[in-house]
Structure formats: structure tokens, C-alpha cells
Image (cartoon, rainbow, N blue to C red):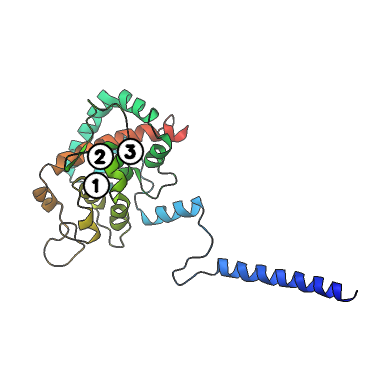
């Protein structure tokens, strides 16, 4: 009879010891600073906010020029073209864009892309999957005259867009025109050049390895594509992130 209390106490102590050990292993960071506890949404958002200098970018009509020029790094001439195009899209297609946003075949994924609440990819990159279509070997912004829905494009599912985003935007030596160069790389299908730091998306070395003007020379028509895409994306994101938009309802 005296043995039973001893067994009970030993069992309790063993259980406590096991819990302490498991807790220690979960909370102790490994060589890369990671613990065994999955990061919550707040932690993920903090990580992205810390590493993406444009995380808190405001999508408002009044912010179009500073966003294109200062945040995205577009040359002033190109940024003004994008602003003019955004005004035209807003005037002529805002109602149609609103309907397309509300009637998406996969609203959850679209909301994640354009609101960027839980995704580590921001709207300026993730909306490429919706606003750019594949025509043969070429990727082109959608034609709002002919388009009636916003659908997730197959090419966008397969393309390493997030890798381009992380490579250029999270870089320790991030270039001021990283967003311009990143969007252009996806539009011309040059993601591999980005990941391998090949010119004109190179990170350094001899010659002009990182060079927007060289991108323009090597890929005729890229300026027009960038202007159309960023203008359309900005207007759509303005609508979605407005006080009455999809992101706030």
C-alpha cells in the first residue's frame, strides 16, 4: 500500500519533467534562430513589414505619382505616363473594375492578392497573376475593353513571382528601382535572370549589370507594358483598399 503513493509521485514528476523538456526544445532557437513554434499572423506581418520597405504603401489617387516615381523607382517621365494612364482607367473603367473585383470566381485568393493581409507577396507583385495574360510567348496586361472578369492566370501560378519579390525587395542592398525592375522581369519572363543576378538584373560586378535602360533596349515595348500594368493595378488596389472596398467589408 505504501508503494502506490511513491508511484503516483514519480509519475507526476516524470510528466512534469517531460513537459519542461518539450517546452525547452520548442522555445530554444536553432542555429538559424528559429523555434519549434509556428509563427502567428502578426509575426509574419512583422517580418514582411520589416523586410519590405514598401509594406505600408498607401494606394490612393493622390499617391500615384510618388508611388510610381519614389517607391517603385520609375523614371519621372515614365511615372507621369503611368499617372495619366491611371486617370484614364479610373475615368473609363472604374465601374467595370469594381464589378470584376466583386464577381471574381475565387474571391478568397483575389482578396489575399489585392489586400495583402496574410500573404507575404504584396499587391504590386501578386496582382500580376490577375492583370497580365499569356498570349503565345508574350505576357501582356489585360485589355479592359475586352476583359469581363479577373481570373487567376495559369502562367501566374507557375511563374516564380514571389521569388522575384523576395530576391529584389528583401535584399540588404535593395536598389531604389527594385519594384520597377521586378515587375519588368516578370512581364518579360526573365525571372531566372533575377534569381541568378544576371545582367541587366545583376547585383554588381563589372559593367552596368543592373540597368533599367538596358532592360528597355533588350525588351522593346517593356515601358508600355509596365505603364499599363502599374496604372491598372494601382487603380484596382485603390478601389479594393478604400473604406468601402472589398478589403474593408
Q: Nearer the viewer, mark 1 or mark 3?
A: 3
Q: Secondary structure at mark 2?
A: helix
- Measure the alpha-carbon separation of dots 1 and 3: 17 Å
Q: Quadrant of residue 2?
A: bottom right
Q: Residues within 10 Å of mark 3 (few under 14, many from 20)?
A: many
Q: Residues within 10 Å of mark 2 (few under 14, many from 20)?
A: many
Q: Which mark is residue 106?
A: none
Q: Position of residue 37 (x, y in %)?
A: 54, 61
Point 18% across, 43% down: residue: 76
Q: Which residue is mark 2?
A: 230
Whether 181 is drawn above or below 151: the answer is below
Residue toward you, 248 or 137: 137
Q: Residues within 10 Å of mark 1 (few under 14, many from 20)?
A: many
Q: Which residue is mark 1?
A: 183
Q: Earlier in the sequence, mark 2 or mark 1?
A: 1
Residue 77 is at least partly visible in this image: no
- Measure the alpha-carbon separation of dots 3 and 2: 17 Å
Q: Indicate the quadrant containing the N terminus: top left, top right, bottom left or bottom right.
A: bottom right
Amino acid at each position: 500500500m505504501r508503494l502506490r503513493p511513491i508511484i503516483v509521485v514519480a509519475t507526476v514528476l516524470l510528466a512534469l519533467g517531460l513537459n519542461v523538456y518539450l517546452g525547452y526544445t520548442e522555445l530554444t532557437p536553432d542555429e538559424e534562430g528559429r523555434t519549434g513554434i509556428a509563427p502567428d499572423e502578426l509575426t509574419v506581418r512583422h517580418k514582411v513589414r520589416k523586410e519590405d520597405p514598401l509594406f505600408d504603401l498607401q494606394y490612393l489617387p493622390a499617391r500615384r505619382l510618388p508611388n510610381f516615381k519614389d517607391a517603385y523607382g520609375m523614371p519621372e517621365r515614365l511615372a507621369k505616363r503611368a499617372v495619366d494612364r491611371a486617370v484614364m482607367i479610373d475615368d473609363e473603367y472604374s465601374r467595370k473594375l469594381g464589378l470584376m473585383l466583386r464577381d471574381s470566381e475565387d474571391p478568397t485568393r483575389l482578396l489575399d492578392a489585392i489586400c495583402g493581409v496574410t500573404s507575404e507577396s504584396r499587391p504590386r507583385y501578386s496582382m500580376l497573376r490577375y492583370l497580365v495574360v499569356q498570349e503565345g510567348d508574350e505576357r501582356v496586361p489585360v485589355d479592359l475593353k475586352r476583359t469581363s472578369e479577373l481570373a487567376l492566370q495559369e502562367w501566374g501560378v507557375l511563374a516564380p513571382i514571389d521569388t522575384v519579390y523576395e530576391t529584389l525587395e528583401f535584399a540588404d542592398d535593395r536598389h531604389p528601382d527594385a519594384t520597377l525592375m521586378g515587375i519588368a522581369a516578370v512581364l518579360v519572363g526573365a525571372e531566372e535572370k533575377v534569381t541568378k543576378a544576371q545582367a541587366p538584373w545583376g547585383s554588381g560586378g563589372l559593367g552596368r549589370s543592373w540597368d533599367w535602360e538596358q532592360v528597355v533596349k533588350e525588351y522593346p515595348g517593356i515601358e508600355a507594358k509596365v505603364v499599363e500594368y502599374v496604372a491598372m493595378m494601382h487603380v484596382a488596389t485603390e478601389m479594393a483598399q478604400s473604406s468601402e472596398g472589398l478589403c474593408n467589408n
